[in-house]
Amino acid sequence: MRRRITDTSRYLSYVLRHAPGAIGLTLDREGWADIDDLIASARQAGHTLDPRVIRAVVEGNDKQRFALSVCGQRIRAVQGHSTDAVTIQREPALPPERLFHGTATRFLDSILVEGLRPGIRHHVHLSEDIAAAAQVGQRHGTPVVLTIQSRQMHQQGYAFYLADNGVWLTGPIPKTFITT
């Protein structure tokens, strides 16, 4: 069962964050998909999804990557989108003094020259927790945690948003706000 939950989580991340069109699924502007439509679209694409496993993924995901609607009939990824079809409306939030970004050491030279960019995603993802940032960096190689002067950025007009799962989101971060 554990393997099925992991596989379903990865599949949901792919479909709900990056490529709903790959299975013919349409997300609304806030990223929501009807669970029955998701299951039917996945089936047509040759992938079997079970509603109980989907709920187990949402409820048991330690990073809270997904959310169910109040009625329990819709699902969405709470952040990390790269599809232009999704533009979740968030209220700007006052960030803490510092936030952290985990990356791999192989990207460090480029970041220190160019700053941080969202890449294919809509936002740069930041954490209030150094350990969580380090864990993110580990996924890409030898980790390094960058300190972001988020309050200073905010005071200079940069917008920050807090996703439902506690991940801080912002646009490109100039190198002047980054320290190692």
Image (cartoon, rainbow, N blue to C red):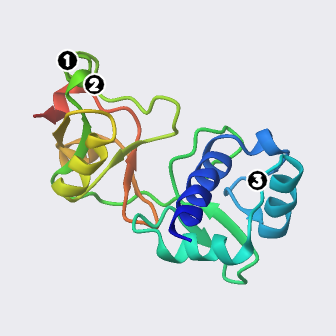
Of badges 1 and 2, nearer the viewer stands 1
Q: Residue at x 63, y 51 (%)?
A: 11
* Extreme-bottom residue of the structure: 71
Q: Secondary structure at mark 1?
A: helix
In the image, which disc is placed on residue 27? 3
Q: Residue at x 76, y 53 (%)?
A: 27
In the image, which disc is placed on residue 38? none
Q: Could you tell me how far apart the alpha carbons at marks 1 and 2 are, in whole angstroms?
A: 10 Å
Query: Is 38 situated left or right of 133 in this image?
Result: right
Q: Residue at x 32, y 29 (%)?
A: 116
Could you tell me how many numbered marks the image carries?
3
Please state the horizontal and vertical placement of residue 128, each as a whole percent of the image: 23, 58
Q: Is residue 70 above or below residue 23?
A: below
Q: Is residue 32 visible?
A: yes
Please state the horizontal and vertical placement of residue 64, each as a whole percent of the image: 46, 67
Q: Earlier in the sequence, mark 1 or mark 2?
A: 1
Q: Nearer the viewer, residue 12 or 147?
A: 12
Q: Residue at x 71, y 61 (%)?
A: 32
Q: Nearer the viewer, residue 169 or 106?
A: 106
Q: Earlier in the sequence, mark 1 or mark 3?
A: 3
* Extreme-left residue of the structure: 180
Amino acid type shown at disc 2: Gly
Mark 3 neighbour density, 10 Å: few (under 14) some (14–19) many (20 or more) = many
Residue highlighted by disc 1 = 109
